[in-house]
Image: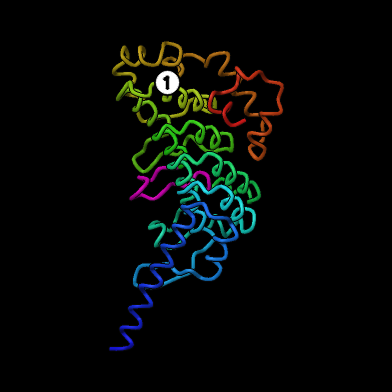
Amino acid sequence: MGFITILGEQRVEERILSLAFYQAVRDLLPVWVLEDMRIMEVLHWEDGGKVSAYSPSEALLYALVHDHRPYAEYLLSRFREDALAMPSRNFSCCQSCAPHLSMAVRYDRVAILRRILQTLRGFPDSSWAGYINRRGCQRIEGGKTPVHLACELLRAECLILLLGHGACLRNPDSSGNTPLDLLLQLLWDSKQDLLLKRQCLDSLLLYLPGGLPFKLRDRLVEDRGPWMELLGLDLYRWLMGTSPPSLFNSSMQTLLRTLPPDRFPEALEALPLPDFLKPLALRKQL
């Protein structure tokens, strides 16, 4: 009985220490304090009653939630692969998808997202592409990629960063929707946040390949009049494949294709391009 009492007290103490680490990140304590706590094996509980020390990956998730940029910078600089590795099941129920990009988009952590993408540049090309285009948790993210999530939540700055780093627009989510489908549906459903929706759509169009299939195409044909009014005649015809993109969009697509994804957005910043020609979301980043 005494052993059970001691074990119970130990578990209570471990839970308190685990909460203390979360609160320390939330309170934006200095990096050295946080790392001292993590390295001293502050434990958290996993399914089945197992306890584990916080990994750099799990610490980065806390940094993302609370926008602790110095701590995120430290973790990504010091650990890199480990910081972006899969966390335990206690932090991510889907063990096939690292959640850091989706978390950054969901909480609109633009600065940390940019730093994560910079870190990914050091990964092999195949790993990089697989990471940035990986679907999120089916239960939490609905099987959406980070680009899908940025469109759904209207995270314009996150969206342009992901697109500039080579995120794919052809991949559907688990419901068969492309990012374009999500934005078109948002425009159709409500006129709220219309400027932000159009801003996201304009950013998407800068990277949209010609002839891209999308799920809502038949609906655009059936409800031709309302969609033409909503999108404008030129854009409607372009999406239907009956006319080329505008001269501005075509020129910007050509320009953006010349920029290496591993140097975005720095390469665009270096171009002698007037600010008014840059995407609005990108202007905030540069």
**Can you give x and y, in whole percent of width and height, for residue 143 in the image?**
38, 46
Which span is picked out in magenta?
A: 131-145
Is the residue 249 above or below the residue 58 in the image? above
x 60%, y 48%: residue: 120
**Can you give x and y, in whole percent of width and height, for residue 150 in the image?**
44, 36
**Can you give x and y, in whole percent of width and height, for residue 87 in the image?**
47, 60
x 43%, y 65%: residue: 18
Name the residue that disc number 1 marks: 195
Is the residue 83 above or below the residue 187 in the image? below
Amino acid carrying label 1: it is Leu
Identify the image's colour scheme: rainbow, by chain, secondary structure or one colour. Answer: rainbow
Most foreground residue, 142 or 245: 142
**Can you give x and y, in whole percent of width and height, for residue 112 in the image?**
55, 44
Quadrant of image for the N terminus: bottom left
Q: Main secondary structure of the magenta part?
A: loop
Task: Answer few, some or many: residues within 10 Å of disc 1's Cα (few below 14, many 20 plus, some between 14 and 19).
Answer: few
Is the residue 118 above or below the residue 62 in the image? above
Most foreground residue, 221 or 122: 122
Quadrant of image for the C terminus: top right
Q: Is residue 98 visible?
A: no
x 37%, y 35%: residue: 177
Most foreground residue, 283 or 262: 283
- Is 190 left, or right, of 273 in this rendering? left
Secondary structure, mark 1, is: helix
